[in-house]
Image: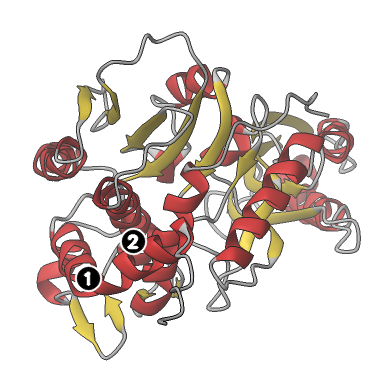
C-alpha cells in the first residue's frame, strides 16, 4: 500500500511558485529599472505607471492614476468590487529614484550571477516587482486575501512625499495593517520595525559688516557666532539615546576682508521617539546668540514622525515572524535612522517597513538586488497578505 503524500501548505505552494518564476521576476525587475524615473522629472512616470498598472490589472485589480501638481503623482490598485468602507491592508511603495536622467544609459542595468544591478533597483523597484509577483502568486494558487489589498505607489517619496502623504494617511486610517516595500536593512535583509523621526532646521545669524582691516571693531561677525552655534548643535547629539544632530551645510560671509554680516546653517536632526524629538527641537529653538552685536533665528521642525514599536506594530511584527518561520525564514528586525512613508502610516495603523528587496548600495553606484532573497520576499509578502485581520489594539 502506498503511503499518503505529506500535505502541502499554502506557504509551500507560494514558495514553489516564487522559485519557479524566479527568472520572470528578474526580467520584470530589469524592465522596471530600465525605465528611469527621477523624482524631478514628472514626465518619466507615465510609461512606468502604465507598465505597473498592466501588472496589477493582470491579476484583476482596478488601477487609478492620480496626477500630481509638481510631481509625477501616484498610482493606486485595488479590488474593483470593494465597497470603499471596509478595512484594507495597505501596501506602499514609491517609483521615484535619486538618479538623474541618463544614468541607466551610462551604466546599463544588468543581471549578473545572483544579483540585479542598476539605479533604483534596490530603492525601490525591487519592492514593486515583489508586489506584482506576490499578487500573481496568490492568483496562481487560487487563494484570496481575507482583507482587501490596496496598493499605492508614489513618485515623491525621495523628497518627503509632499503630494502623496495626505492620501497615504487617509488610507492608513482605514488599514488593518500596512506593509511598506522599502528595501530591507543591509545585505542581511533585516526588517525595519522602527524608524526615527526626521527634522530639518535652518539657523540664520545676522551680524554687522565692517572692513576687516580698517575697523573690524565696528562689525559683528556672523561667522564667529556660527562657529559657536555649530559646537552647541553637535553637542546635542546623544548616540546612546538615538538622537543625532548634524550641521551638513553652511553659508557665511561676503569675502575674506569683510566681517561677515550673515551666516546660515542647515541642520539634520533624528530622534527615536516623539518625546525625544520634542526635547531636541525645543533645545534648538532656544538657542541664543552669544557674540555681541549678532542675532539668531531658527526655522523648521520635524517633517516625519517616528515609527515607534507600538503595541500594534509589535503584534504585526510577531505575525510576520511567524509567517516567515512557516516559509523557513528566520527574520530579524532593526531600527532605521532613515525615514519613509512608514513613519506617517504607523501613526494610524500597525506598520511594518523595510519589507521589500534585499541587497546593498541604495543611492550608490553599486546598487543591487539579491535575486534569491527577492524570490523569498515574494513568497513572504504573498503569505502575509493571506493572514486574518489583526486583533483590534490601541496604538500607543
Q: Which mark is residue 318?
A: none
Q: How many numbered dots are placed on residues in this image?
A: 2
- Kind of element beneath mark 2: helix
Q: Is residue 71 above or below residue 44?
A: above
Tell me where residue 107 appears, x and y as whole percent.
17, 77
**Pointer 1: what residue?**
26
Label 2: how many residues lie within 10 Å, few (<14), some (14-19) or many (20+)? many
Left or right: 286 with respect to 355?
right
Residue 261 in view of the camera: no
Left or right: 348 with respect to 219?
left
Q: Is residue 81 above or below residue 172?
A: above
Q: Residue at the location (53% across, 22% down)?
A: 169
Residue 44 in view of the camera: yes
Q: Residue at the location (48% across, 72% down)?
A: 6
When asked about the image quadrant of residue 190, the answer is bottom right
Q: Tell which residue pokes out farthest to the bottom in this image.
A: 113
When asked about the image quadrant of residue 40, the answer is top left
The quarter of the picture where the C terminus appears is top right
Q: Are marks 1 and 2 in contact (CB under 8 Å)?
A: no
Label 1: how many residues lie within 10 Å, few (<14), some (14-19) or many (20+)? many
Tell me where residue 370 appears, x and y as whole percent.
38, 77
Amino acid at each position: 500500500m502506498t503511503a499518503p503524500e505529506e500535505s502541502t501548505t499554502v506557504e509551500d505552494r507560494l514558495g514553489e511558485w516564487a522559485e519557479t518564476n524566479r527568472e520572470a521576476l528578474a526580467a520584470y525587475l530589469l524592465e522596471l529599472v530600465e525605465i528611469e524615473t527621477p523624482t524631478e522629472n514628472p514626465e518619466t512616470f507615465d510609461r512606468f505607471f502604465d507598465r505597473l498598472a498592466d501588472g496589477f490589472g493582470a491579476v484583476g485589480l482596478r488601477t487609478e492614476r492620480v496626477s500630481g501638481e509638481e510631481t509625477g503623482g501616484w498610482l493606486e490598485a485595488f479590488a474593483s468590487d470593494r465597497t470603499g468602507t471596509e478595512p484594507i491592508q495597505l501596501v506602499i511603495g514609491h517609483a521615484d529614484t535619486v538618479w538623474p536622467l541618463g544614468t541607466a544609459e551610462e551604466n546599463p542595468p544588468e543581471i549578473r550571477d545572483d544579483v540585479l544591478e542598476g539605479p533604483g533597483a534596490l530603492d525601490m523597484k525591487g519592492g514593486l516587482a515583489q508586489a506584482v509577483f506576490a499578487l500573481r502568486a496568490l492568483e496562481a494558487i487560487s487563494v484570496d486575501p481575507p482583507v482587501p489589498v490596496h496598493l499605492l505607489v508614489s513618485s515623491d517619496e525621495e523628497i518627503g512625499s509632499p503630494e502623496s502623504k495626505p492620501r497615504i494617511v487617509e488610507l492608513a486610517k482605514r488599514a488593518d495593517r500596512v506593509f511598506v516595500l522599502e528595501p530591507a536593512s543591509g545585505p542581511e535583509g533585516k526588517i525595519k520595525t522602527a524608524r526615527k523621526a526626521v527634522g530639518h532646521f535652518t539657523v540664520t545669524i545676522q551680524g554687522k559688516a565692517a572692513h576687516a582691516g580698517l575697523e573690524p571693531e565696528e562689525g559683528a561677525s556672523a561667522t564667529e557666532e556660527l562657529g559657536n552655534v555649530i559646537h552647541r548643535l553637535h553637542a546635542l547629539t546623544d548616540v546612546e539615546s538615538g538622537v543625532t544632530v548634524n550641521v551638513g551645510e553652511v553659508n557665511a560671509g561676503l569675502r575674506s576682508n569683510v566681517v561677515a554680516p550673515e551666516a546660515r546653517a542647515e541642520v539634520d536632526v533624528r530622534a527615536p521617539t516623539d518625546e525625544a524629538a520634542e526635547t531636541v527641537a525645543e533645545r534648538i529653538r532656544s538657542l541664543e546668540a552669544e557674540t555681541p552685536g549678532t542675532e539668531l533665528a531658527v526655522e523648521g521642525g520635524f517633517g516625519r514622525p517616528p515609527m515607534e514599536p507600538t503595541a500594534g506594530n509589535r503584534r504585526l511584527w510577531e505575525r510576520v515572524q511567524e509567517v516567515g518561520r512557516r516559509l523557513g525564514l528566520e527574520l530579524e528586525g532593526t531600527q532605521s535612522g532613515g525615514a519613509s512613508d512608514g513613519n506617517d502610516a504607523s501613526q494610524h495603523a500597525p506598520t511594518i517597513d523595510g519589507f521589500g528587496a534585499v541587497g546593498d548600495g541604495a543611492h550608490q553606484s553599486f546598487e543591487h538586488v539579491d535575486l534569491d532573497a527577492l524570490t523569498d520576499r515574494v513568497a513572504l509578502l504573498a503569505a502575509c497578505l493571506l493572514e486574518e485581520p489583526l486583533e483590534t489594539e490601541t496604538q500607543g
